[in-house]
Image (tube, coloured by chain):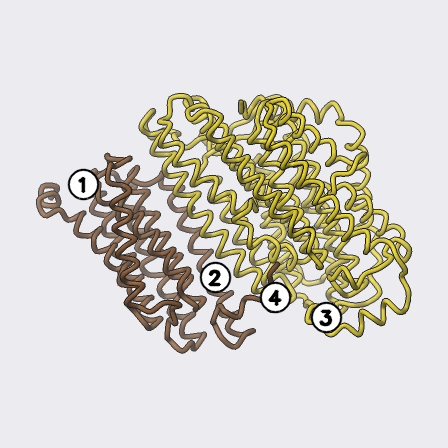
Chain colours: A yellow, B brown
Amino acid sequence: MVAILLIPLVTAALCYLLKSPRGIGYASMSGAVVLSAVSLPTILSVVSFPAEMMNGMLYMDALSGYIMAMVIFLGLASALYSVSYLEHELKVHLTDILGIRRYYALLHLFIFTMLLVTVANNLALMWIAIEATTIVSALLIGLGFYKRHLAIEAAWKYIILCTVGITFALLGTFITYYASTAVMGTEGALNWTVLKGISGSLNPSTMKLAFIFILVGYGTKAGLAPMHNWLPDAHSQAPSPISALLSGILLNTAFYGVMRFVSIVEPSTGDLFTGNLLILFGLISIGLSSVFILVQDNYKRLLAYSSIEHMGIISLGVGIGGPLGIYGALLHILNHALSKPLMFLASGKIQSHYGSTRIENIRGVLSSMPLLGTLTFVGAFSLAGTPPFNIFISEFTILKAAVDKALWPVVVLFLIFVVLVFYGMLSGFGRMLFGRSGEEEEKQAKGMEDETVSEVSRFRSCGFPDVLGNAVMIVMAVCIVVLGFMVPDFLDSTIRSCVVILGIK
Amino acid sequence: MKNWIQAFSVIDFISVGILLTAVAMNAFKRLESCVKIYTLNSLLLSSLIAIVALMVGEPHLYIASAATLLGKGILIPMFLRRVVRQMKVTHDVEPYINNALSLAISGVLVAVVYASLRQGIFVSGFSKNVLQISIAVILIGLFVMITRRKAITQVIGLLFMENGLFLAGFSLTYGMPIIIELGVLFDMLMGVIILGIFAVQIKRTFASSNLDNLTILKG
C-alpha cells in the first residue's frame, strides 16, 4: 500500500529533475505503468480481504480498491496521451521545457493525492487529501503550461469556491469527531472502520448537522448543483488530459467521501434524511445541467455540464439507496469514468485540428477524421444514455431502483431531464460529427473574429499523429461497448461487495 | 495558574478579542491594515490554544499552539505582505458596500449566531461562548469574501474563516490529533501560497487585481 503511494511521488520528482521533453514523457509513462503493475495485486486482494495500515490511518477495502483502480487507469491513460499532446504544445510554442517539467510533476502529484483519498481511513486525513487535490489541480489548470487569462480566471474560481466549500466539510468532520468522542473516547475516533462499528449509537441530531456540512462541502467538490459554478470553467479551460482526470475521477473521489459519510450517518439518522437530501441535490444537478446542455455552444463546456448531470445521477442512485440503487450508482461511476475521459481526450484532438471550441465552427469530424470521429460517436452516444452503450445500463438500473421504491415524482423528473440531455448532447455532437467538411468551413472558422478563436488560433495546426493517445481512446471505447452488453463477473462481484461494505439501506 | 485563568475568565476575554478583530476587519480601508488585523487574530488564536493547553494539561495542544503561531501568525502574514508589496495595489479594499454598513451587518451576523445557538446544541467544551464566537467568525469571514473586490481580500476572508474553523474545532473537541492538525495547517499554508501566486498572475494579466474582471467565463 505504501509502495502504491510512493511510486507517483518518485515519478513526480523524476519528471521535475529530467531535462529533455522526451525523457520526461518516458519517465512519466513508465512511472504510470509501474504504478498499475504494482497496484494490481493489492487491488485484487483487498476486494476480498480488507487491509489496514499505520494504526488504522490507512485502510483499503473493495470500495477503495474499486475507486483506486479507476484513478490508476485514468492516470495511466492521461500520462500516455500527454506525451504527444505536450510535444505538440511545445512545437507550437504554447509551452516550454519548464512548463513540461512542472506539468508532469504536478500530474503525478495529482495522482498521488487522489490515491491518498482512496486509502485514507481517518476521515480528517481524507479531508486533507481532498483539499490537496484541489490545490494541485488548480495549479494544473492555471499554471499548467499555457498562461492564458481565461485559465487563470477558471483556476481562481475553482480554488476559491472549492476551498470555501471544503472548509465546511472540515467543520462537518470536527462535528463527527465530537459525536464519536462522546460515545467512545478519542482513540481512533475518526477512523471510518471504527465509526462504522458504532454508527448506530451516535447522536442523531449531531450527525444530521455534520452530514449537512459534509454534503455541502464535498458536494461542492463533486460538482453537485447549486454549488457547481466553478466546474464548467475549470473543466473547459484545463488541458485536455487534465480535464479527463478532473471530470472522470476527481469528482468521484470527492463523492467517494460523501458515500463513506452516508454509510456512517445513515444508521443513526435513518435513511430518509440522507436519502432525501441526496435525491434533492441529485435532481437539482440533473435538471440544471440539462438546461445548460441544451443551450451550450462550446463543446468542452457541454462536456463539463454533462459531468454535473452524471454526478447528479450518481447522487440520485445513492439517495434512492437499497442494494439496487447503490449498485447502479457504483456502476455509473465506472461508466462515467470511461466515457467522459474518452470525450475529453477526443475533444483535445478536435480542438487542435479545428482550432476552436465552438460547436458551430466544427463540421464533419466523421468524414475528415474517421477514427477520431468514430470514437467521439461512441463517447457521445454513451454519454447521452443511448443503448447499447454502458451508461444506459447504469441509468436504467437506477431508474429501476426508483420504480421499486415507488418514488414516482423522482422517476418522472429523472426521465424528463434525461430526455432533455439526450437531445442536447446528440444535437450538439451530431452537428460536429456529421455534415460537410470542406474548405469553406475552414475559411469560415478563420473569418471568425471572436475571442476564443483568436486565442486558440496559435493552437491550430493539422492535428498531431499520436499512436499512444489513439490506443488509449480505443481501449476506452471498447470497454464502453463491452460494458454496454454485459457486466463481467469479477466486476459484478466487486460492486456487490462494495454495496455490502457501504450497507446503505 | 488554573485558578487565575478561571477567575479572570481569560478564555472569554481572548475569544471576544478574536471576534472583535474579525468584526474590525470590516472597518479597514487599507490592505496592509487587513493583513495586520489578521495577524492579531491569529496571535490571539494561538495564545487561546496555549492557555487551554495550560488548563487541561494536554501536551499536544502546546504543539498545536506553536504550529498556529508559526504558520498563521508569522509565515502567512509575511507572505501576504510580500504579495501586497509585489502587486503594488492601490491599497484600497474597495468593498461593494460601504464600511459602516458592513460593520452593521457583521454585528447582525453575530446576533443571529447567538440567537440560533442559544439552546446550545454542544454545551460542553471549555467555554460555551467559544463555539458561538467561532461560528460568528466563520460567517464574518464568508461575508468579507463576498463583499470585497480585491483578490487579496478574498484570501484574507478565507483565512478568517479558517481561524474560526480552528476555534470551532478546539471548542468542540480540544482539537484533532496532532498529526491531523499539522496536516490541515500544511494544506492551508499551501493553499494560501497558491492563491497568492494566482493573485499576482491576475494582477499581471488584467493589470488590476479587481475581481470584476473575472467575468468572461459564464453560461
Callout 3 touching callout 4 (CB < 8 Å): no
Quarter of image, res A155: bottom right
Q: CA distance from mark 3 to mark 4?
A: 18 Å
Q: CA distance from mark 3 to mark 1?
A: 61 Å
- Output the chain of dot 3: A
Give x and y (percent) for residue A15: 65, 55
Give x and y (percent) for residue A282: 57, 39
**As shown in the figure, which amino acid type bears the numbered disc 1?**
Met
Quarter of image, res B22: bottom left
Disc 1 marks which residue?
B55
Disc 3 marks which residue?
A93
Tally of marks: 4
Q: Nearer the viewer, residue A33 or A217?
A: A217
Local crowd size for mark 3, using a 10 Å CA cut-off: few (<14), some (14–19), many (≥20): few
Callout 3 touching callout 1 (CB < 8 Å): no
**As shown in the figure, which amino acid type bears the numbered disc 2?**
Leu
Disc 4 marks which residue?
A150
Q: CA distance from mark 1 to mark 4?
A: 52 Å
Give x and y (percent) for residue A229: 55, 54
**As shown in the figure, which amino acid type bears the numbered disc 3?**
His
Q: Which mark is residue B21?
A: none
Disc 2 marks which residue?
B195
**As shown in the figure, which amino acid type bears the numbered disc 4?**
Leu
Q: Nearer the viewer, residue A362 or A168?
A: A362
